[in-house]
Image: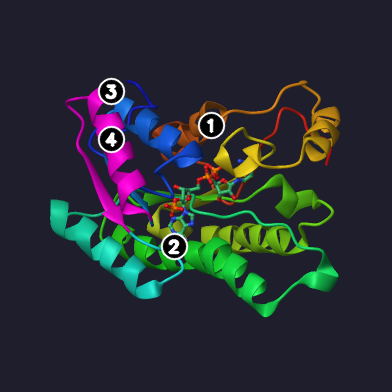
Amino acid sequence: MNLLSLEGKTCLITGSSQGIGFQTANLFVQHGAKVFISSRDENSLNLALEKIKSNYPKSEIFAIKCDVSIESEVKLLFQTIFKTYKSSLDVLVANAGILESSLIGMVTKEHLNKIFSINTFGYIYCCQYASRLMMRNSMGGSIIGISSIMGLSGYSGYSIYSGSKAAIIGVTKSLSKELATSKIRVNCLSPGYIQTNMTQGLPDKNKEEVMKMIGMGRFGNPQDVANAVLFLASDMSSYITGEVLSIDGGMAK
Ligand code: NDP
């Protein structure tokens, strides 16, 4: 029996038009899942859909536009998933997120609202609707949040982002207790520095500083994270819940 197989499972990955989410969608399809990808920009989302379909022509994959910070859009996303298969959801990867720096003295209310409404409220909305759907399933399900090393140990100039990611850990831990009796596992990942569009624009000075902190001497790539997501989504981790798994190449915390 292949415990890593996602054959027959319906999975949603938010923020999957690029980066970690896109790589995860490819890996899930490769492992037999029915996959819903989702993000805000329709063009890049459709482009991602076409790429995955051309990589895996027999895949069952759908794209639904959704901004996770808008509750009504999240509700519609989950309603559409339910209508498509008339069945439950098995896996949620709540990956959508944004990174912006902010020195504390310069933080505006707009910045605060933007970061928390996408990174934290978006996670909570998705957990709410996913858990309701998963409860229809006697087999339970798996929810995977994407926190960050900054949510665990912080980084100068990123207090708001770090706070939004630390909140994901608290929500994950409590939800894992609340949903365990429904056989819904809730875990999150704490990636270190992963090479995606999110990090490519960071100043070279920051990149050099971060590289010195990484024991394994290389930045991570989206596949490194996707592999860990697959583990938490699959039956390979069937007795693991409430955990925060670091994917950071031994980065100093
Ligand atoms: P990218 O910027 O490459 O991708 C982010 C994805 O999220 C895009 O598909 C984007 O599409 C989508 N997205 C952004 N805002 C929203 C929104 N409001 N609603 C729905 N989708 C949204 O980032 P990464 O792949 O690097 O990051 C993925 C996750 O991993 C994020 O949560 C990030 O915080 C976390 N992370 C990343 C690290 C890294 O080093 N890269 C380290 C630690 C954590 P669109 O803009 O079209 O909506």
Measured in 3D between alpha carbons, the distance from the residue under mark 2 to the one under mark 3, in whole angstroms, is 30 Å
Q: Amino acid at mark 3?
A: Asn
- Residue name at image x 83 percent, y 37 percent: 205
Bounds of the magenta segment: 41-65
Q: Position of residue 167 (x, y in %)?
A: 65, 63
Q: Nearer the viewer, mark 4 or mark 1?
A: 1
Measured in 3D between alpha carbons, the distance from the residue under mark 4 to the one under mark 1, in whole angstroms, is 19 Å
Q: Position of residue 145 (x, y in %)?
A: 53, 51
Determine whether, in the image, residue 217 is placed left or right of residue 146.
right
Measured in 3D between alpha carbons, the distance from the residue under mark 3 to the one under mark 4, in whole angstroms, is 14 Å
**Image mark count:** 4
- Residue name at image x 44 percent, y 68 percent: 125
Q: Amino acid at mark 2?
A: Cys
Determine whether, in the image, residue 199 is placed left or right of residue 5.
right
* Disc 4 target residue: 33
Other residues around mark 4 within 10 Å, as few (<14) / some (14–19) / many (≥20): many
Question: Which numbered disc flags the more N-terminal residue, 2 or 4?
Answer: 4
CB under 8 Å between discs 4 and 1: no
Measured in 3D between alpha carbons, the distance from the residue under mark 2 to the one under mark 4, in whole angstroms, is 20 Å
* Disc 1 target residue: 222
Choose top left, top right, bottom left or bottom right for residue 6. top left
Question: Which numbered disc flags the more N-terminal residue, 2 or 1?
Answer: 2
Q: Amino acid at mark 4?
A: Ala
Measured in 3D between alpha carbons, the distance from the residue under mark 3 to the one under mark 1, in whole angstroms, is 17 Å
Q: Secondary structure at mark 4?
A: loop
Q: Is residue 71 magenta?
A: no
Mark on residue 127? 2
Q: Amino acid at mark 1?
A: Pro
The one nearer the camera, 168 or 118, is 118
Mark 1 within 8 Å of ligand 1, using the beta carbon: yes
- Residue name at image x 50 percent, y 29 percent: 227
The one nearer the camera, 94 or 239, is 94
